[in-house]
Image (cartoon, rainbow, N blue to C red):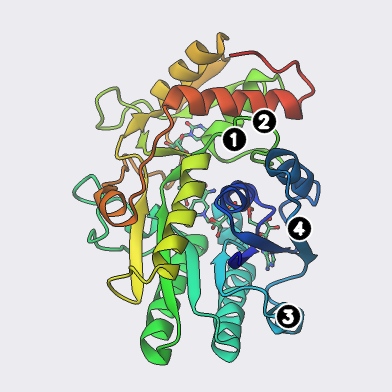
Amino acid sequence: MKQGVLVTGGTGYIGSHTVVELIEAGYEVIIVDNLSNSEESVIDGIEAITGVRPDFVKADCRDIVALEELFDKGKFNSIIHFAAAKAVGESVEKPLEYYHNNLLSLINIISLMRKYNVPNLVFSSSCTVYGQPDVLPATEQTPRLEAESPYGNTKRISEDIIRDSVKAYGTIKSIALRYFNPIGAHPSALIGELPRGVPNNLLPYVTQTAAGIREVLSIFGDDYNTPDGFCIRDYIDINDLAAAHVAALDRMIGSKMKESYEVFNIGTGRGVSTMEIVKTFEKVNDLNLNYRITGRRAGDIEAMWADPTYANEELGWYARKSLYETLRSAWKWQQRLSGLEISKD
Ligand code: NAD
Ligand code: UD1
């Protein structure tokens, strides 16, 4: 019989790509999402790619009564919890909303896991918990630093809530995946990122500039202490990131965990500068991007990349896509969103 998985936030950017990977790996998926930052039509894209239409329930994870109805049907023994608000700047302006959404949703999920004996939880954490480490690449042992924003703090607190719950209750196992910078889209261009309003993150800004939605990309700072002076990040292909969730679930269900709560870095292990992204994007998509170099963005860290060895060895997971493929998929997805002809490889 197929294993059932509840995917909260499953119509979102990372959730939708993970649902595709889960279906392709033979899992039966139930999505719950309140559509606060996604659209139900994403399900059509998932169905077009996989040939399977996952169950979808529109509900808010803060609403424990609505969630309980799902648990009551008993169709899953694992949960991947993506549902959260994620805009760093907004979280500074609306901290209570962020603590309320991100923490209450998690607490509800764990409470119902206890009540209904659902054992497995995969949680979306972030490399933001490391702040700017003294030593790079960041390993799972790199100390977590005081969060820079309420959003970042919700990730740190969520990790602690999970760790303490796993320890105290004994019935729950969990893997927290610390994502580095997810970019790109499904190679079919049928699903991808749907940023609302003016994008804060680099890749959507790049693709929207290439599509003419934004006039010019600002590159924030060229005076960092890095080889070319630009900030460095570890950009992980969204499909590779999605596959890490399947590996984590397989590990839990296959009883391969060494401890009941484990943490993995999910990155490529390669630091790439902002300018390298821009230049590679131009090259692989055969276009010129309108950009200018401006001052630093407040709060930006200089450099960040992962040591993914632990995930490689323990999960058997590797980042496989090249930056070339990823930046192609990002542009093809933008072409589809903008109604442009999708360029051929
Ligand atoms: P996203 O906004 O595309 O997806 C999140 C989904 O959760 C959305 O579909 C939204 O409608 C839904 N949602 C939010 N609050 C909800 C609630 N209370 N009840 C039900 N649904 C709710 O974001 P994403 O980029 O796919 O991120 C998924 C997860 O990964 C989040 O927890 C995010 O914090 C984390 N994460 C993202 C990044 C990144 O760069 N994208 C990096 C590290 C961690
Ligand atoms: C973001 C999140 C952070 C999360 C991390 C990994 C924000 C503010 N922070 O940060 O919480 O942990 O992703 O998922 O959303 N850049 C430009 N011009 C732009 C946009 C970005 O030059 O218009 C540069 C930035 O200065 C940075 C790099 O591109 O050096 C990447 O920026 P971004 O996509 O926002 O990611 P992070 O800064 O890593």
Task: Look at mark 2 in the image and give the residue it sits on.
Answer: 189
- Residue drawn at x 26%, y 30% as measured from the top left: 226
Q: Position of residue 181 (x, y in %)?
A: 45, 43
Q: Position of residue 325 (x, y in %)?
A: 49, 25
Which of pointers 3 and 2 indicates the residue nearer the eye?
Answer: 3
Q: Secondary structure at mark 2?
A: loop
Q: Position of 259 compared to 214: left or right? A: left
Query: Is 37 situated above or below 232?
Result: below
Tell me which label, 3 or 4, sits earlier in the chain.
4
Which of pointers 1 and 4 indicates the residue nearer the eye?
Answer: 1
Q: Secondary structure at mark 4?
A: loop
Task: Look at mark 3 in the image and give the residue it sits on.
Answer: 73
* Marks 3/2: CA–CA distance: 34 Å
Residue behind label 4 places its C-beta within 8 angstroms of ligand 1: yes
Task: Look at mark 4 in the image and give the residue it sits on.
Answer: 35
- Residue drawn at x 32%, y 28% as measured from the top left: 223
Q: Secondary structure at mark 1?
A: loop
Q: Nearer the viewer, residue 120 or 206?
A: 120
The quarter of the rendered structure image containing the C terminus is top right
Name the mark on residue 185: 1
Q: Please state which amino acid type lies under the numbered disc 2.
A: Ala
Tell me which label, 1 or 4, sits earlier in the chain.
4
